[in-house]
Image (cartoon, rainbow, N blue to C red):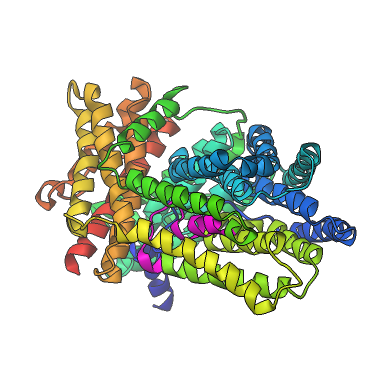
Amino acid sequence: MGRASSITAEGRRSGSPAARGAVPGRGGGRPPAPPGQRLLIVLAVTAVATGTAAAFGLAEITAIAGLGTMFGLMAGVGGSLRADLKLLSWCGPLLVLALAAGPAVDELPALAIAVPTVAVLGAAFAPLLGWRLELAVGAFLTATVLASATGIGTGLSILVRLAAAALGVAFAVVLRIVFGGRDPSANTRTAVSEALTSQDPHTLPQAIKVWRSAGGEPWLGEALAGVSAVRTARAELGARVLTAPPQVGERLRIALVEADRVISQLALAVRARSTRTLPMLDLLLQQLEWVRLASPPADVVRQLDSLTTGLRRVRNSLTTRVTGTTETAPRGARRRILGEELRALLVPQSALLRHALRSTVAVLVGASIAVWQHNPQASILVITIFAVLRPSRRDSVSVALQRAAWTFVAVGFAAAIGAVTPGPILVAAFVVLGVVGFPVLQRNHTALTALLTALVVVLRGVDHRSPLIDIVINFLTSAAIGATLALAVGYLTLPRPRAGLLERVHNAVESVRGLTWALLEPGGARQVKSLHAIAVRRVHDLLAFVDRAEEEPEEVREAAREAGHALDTLRAVLRELAELPEELRRPAVPAVRRVRAVLGPPSQAGPDELQVVPHNQPWQAALAAQMMVTEANAVQRAVARMAEE
């Protein structure tokens, strides 16, 4: 009975608040960190290089080169080797220019105000580009804000700054090749493998995004279609172990033990670099047939068929491993869809646009104050605003206050130790910390801005002839001005919400449901773009509002956040489905109908009596259908939890 309880809990996890709790940002993706052994290599090489530079007193050069490496790794590690190098081919030169142009921008007051302001405005819209491009564009814009607001490299010639930045970025490229040179697609296969074994509902969307960013190998697309079916069937069957009739439940428990063994072996095979011995399905098929002989309910039979089909699909993909690239939507469709999203959010009603404008105004005022004061301590004013507001995501006031507190800690710590420690040594230490800790900095805005703030303090204002208390007070005063400005413009000027959290969830659900109408009704295709624009705006506004609704219980906010992310994924899948050729879109129509019913009133949903996922159809249709049904069910569960609270 203990094993049955374990299996049942495992099945319920996909719908639990805990499972869906670790909600990533709107970019959605989580770049896998390099192995610890390779990070030790990075630590050794970086420590030797920066230590040598520090020994010669080259603090500014060390900082520029180290920042080039750090931002290069933040931008260029996350997908397959080919995709990352392609990305660095255009992002790398931009990083070099951004880091080298700081003093030139800082010398001209107009540019010193305009450049960080425009960079912050761009950073607010970076999440719309997808998690992979968000990392790259975010790294470039952060480097631009840092260099233009602080003038790192003042006193060095432009050629020296360009050479130092280029050397740092080139080192990042070399490290990226070292991370994945022997196995270029390891990150992609690892993401797909984790999606097969993990019950975290976010791993599958993340795996799909990693796979797409790597070029979309067909065999992994086929595997993902099978993974999606396996995940759903495994979770549903696990939940039925205790609720099914005793004989069915016991036989199902035994079959799921064997299914877990097969799933684990298939996951290892997906992760492997080349085809290896694959698990046989004979024993599992016998046990599933034994379950069928016990006359289980119809929904259990459907999930047994789905589990079998999904496992076969994954196994067949491993036997072929067809390489090359494929498109889940026609060429150019994603660019058009991105344009639709941008236009939908560039309206006064958009929460994203309002937060972008608030962040831009705060930086504009802060940069103007820094230019007017024109002293070393003022160099951290803009960085503080950038740290507190986080232009790419609108958070709650309490989170912003936490960021402000951490910024004060970083400023005070750096000013205090900088007054008694040689600058080159501290710069070398911070650079090593940033380069080795880049996987954390990719994920944690607070850690990134705290490190950058400390580095700027050490580089810009430490006067060893001044009393320690004066140094600390001067820097903390500038940080306090920046934090106060950020909080005042970003949060104290917020309008009073006119709609509650539950109402916003229902509005977002109805907007996404409207997309299904456009795909099902004759003539609806002409309205796909306008309905998609409404869905984009309402879903993004919901996600932006969740953290503001601090008066709501945490369970309600968590459920609303889950619903918002599921709706965002569902919206994207429906919109891309509209771009597929008719022969690929037609098999997914039953799933679209099912989504429309699930998102509608409870009286319209009814029992799921039809198999709506076309497992025997092309993998593009199967994957889209499975994703739609899974996310729609997740929305339904989240809304039900909100209603219960």
Question: In x, y percent, where is residue 468?
Answer: 68, 77
In the rendered view, tell whether residue 87 sits above or below residue 569.
above
Q: Is residue 210 visible?
A: no
Quarter of the image where the N terminus is located: bottom left
In the rendered view, tell whether residue 598 sits above or below residue 3.
above
Q: Is residue 500 magenta?
A: no
Q: Is residue 397 magenta?
A: yes
> Who is closer to the viewer here, 642 or 137?
137
Question: In x, y percent, where is residue 588?
Answer: 31, 33
In the rendered view, tell whether residue 251 sits above or below residue 517.
below
Tag count: 0
Question: In x, y percent, where is residue 376?
Answer: 64, 59
> Who is closer to the viewer here, 18 or 318?
18
The residue depicted at 24 percent of the width and 35 percent of the height is 515
- 524 horizontally vs 451: left or right: left
Q: Which segment did they paint magenta?
A: 380-399
Magenta region, main secondary structure: helix
The image quadrant of residue 489 is bottom left
The image quadrant of residue 34 is bottom right
